[in-house]
Image (cartoon, grey):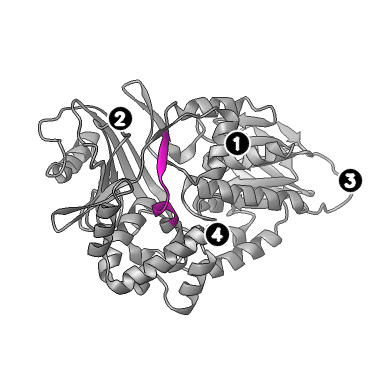
Amino acid sequence: MSEETHDKVAVIGGGVSGLASAHYLARQGWQVDLYEASDRLGGRMAISHLNGQEICLGGKNIGYQYKEFRQFLEYYGPAKYEYFGLNSARLSNGKILPFNSENRTKQRLTLLRSATPADLWKLRSALKAVKAERKNGDVLGPYFKTLGKNRSKTITDYFSPKFSKSLARALTVRMNGAEPDEIALENFGTHLHMLQDEYEQLKSPISEILTAFKADQNIRTKLQTPVKALRRTNGFYAVTGLGFMSLYPKVILALPSYAAADLLSSDFSVFSETLRQARYFPVTVIVAKYKRPVFNAELRALTFPANSALSNIGAYGTKALNVVRYTFSGSASEALNSHVLTDDELLSIAEEQAAPYFNLTGNICQALKRKSWRRGLCAYTLNEANFREMLKAAQSNNPGLYVTGDFIKGASIENCFRAAKETVAFCLKTASIPPKDQTFQLVSRRGT
């Protein structure tokens, strides 16, 4: 079956970037067809259930500075929040070094123990730049672009080994699943913006927001509708899957860059190869519910050293201290992530590493959920300036075809929304693909 849609935009991907793209298009009065391969929206939020309670195995914390995402939640809400804060710590030589937004004294002491005087001076300047200009909290922020261009390539090239292995790693392994020497300095602003924020969580299930989103009259949500091919035909883009083909003047690929590259590989080879430059690292998450509290109010999260396969452990919420989120990411976890382990085997590894610091001994795990991503956390590229130029060239050669995602401005939910908003603005002010002739004749593509 084929369908001609002159006045609609196709958004491919129902994760955070797809939700944002469809929302911004709809608010501008456009009709949107949103294609999602799975049976639910949310993408790497990974919405699931644990003992009948909805949980997100992916990202769920909402910063006070998440302006765009909060407006989205309110539009389909109302949204109700509960305080979570920035309550974490780092394990160093067997000692717990806390980093707590509610205790500035301990926060400063941790910084002093984690850095040299030169590091502290550099960090102070960088934090001021991020606070002064929001763009410095994005990938390739202007302040960090200058640093990367003139002095250094990665975080470890700019900061001391002491700082890189301590505070920097605690940020990169959680956001990107990568080590500091795998993150370009020009992208460090994304981490520092996260560090300066404080966080809340939704009190009500995110699925309630997504249900309201699916009822949006300007958005036609197509679940379990994987797009298998994207081609140019007679001035339109043909979006094709099993049993359907629809034609659009404009298409936004709101996918991880590797997924967008796979979709473009046949007819848009240069665009495809450009997108493959963005890197993604594996991550495995377990959310486990225990009989008794595992955490206390003073310590709700801990990041482990680089030689630990378990990168970090955290409480699922301030009122859910018996629900634990274990994360396996970083270089030491790669071998573990490549093995086929049962849920119980992986949980045992996590508990063994965390037990000396938390109430896990004899504490019965009542239920758990696990999710693994072979390419789960985006670590951007190692040469963003070059990547942007190539992406710009690919875009100009394919008018009407746009990409957005976690590789554009950063991996946080807010940066995905900001990237989508910018992409939609660019989409609406630019022309679509010029037709080969002035008349258009729809051709059936049965079986395509």
Instruction: Please say if the residues under marks 2 and 4 sit with CB atoms less than 8 Å apart.
Output: no
- Please provide percent x and percent y for residue 279: 44, 58
Q: Which of the two discs, 1 and 2, labels the residue nearer the N terminus?
A: 1
Amino acid type of the residue that numbered disc 3 sits on in the rendered structure: Thr
Q: Which of the two discs, 1 and 4, labels the residue nearer the N terminus?
A: 1
Residue at x 61% of width, y 59% of height = 271
Please give left or right for residue 177 compared with residue 381 in the image. left
Give the quarter of the image for residue 441.
top right
Instruction: Please say if the residues under marks 3 and 4 sit with CB atoms less than 8 Å apart.
Output: no
> Label 3 neighbourhood size at 10 Å, few (<14), some (14-19), many (20+)?
few
- Looking at the image, is 427 positioned above or below residue 392? above
Amino acid type of the residue that numbered disc 2 sits on in the rendered structure: Lys
Mark in the foreground, 1 or 2: 2
**Of helix, strand and loop, which one carries label 1?**
strand
> Label 1 neighbourhood size at 10 Å, few (<14), some (14-19), many (20+)?
many
Residue 439's tag is 3
Q: CA distance from mark 1 to mark 2?
A: 36 Å
The answer to whether one can see residue 14 in this image is no
Residue 319's tag is 2
- Looking at the image, is 196 positioned above or below residue 118? above
Amino acid type of the residue that numbered disc 4 sits on in the rendered structure: Lys
Mark in the foreground, 3 or 4: 4
Q: CA distance from mark 3 to mark 2?
A: 62 Å
Please give left or right for residue 409 compared with residue 430 in the image. left
Part of the protein shown in magenta: 193-201
Q: CA distance from mark 3 to mark 1?
A: 28 Å
**Of helix, strand and loop, which one carries label 2?**
loop
Instruction: Give the total number of marks visible in the rendering.
Output: 4
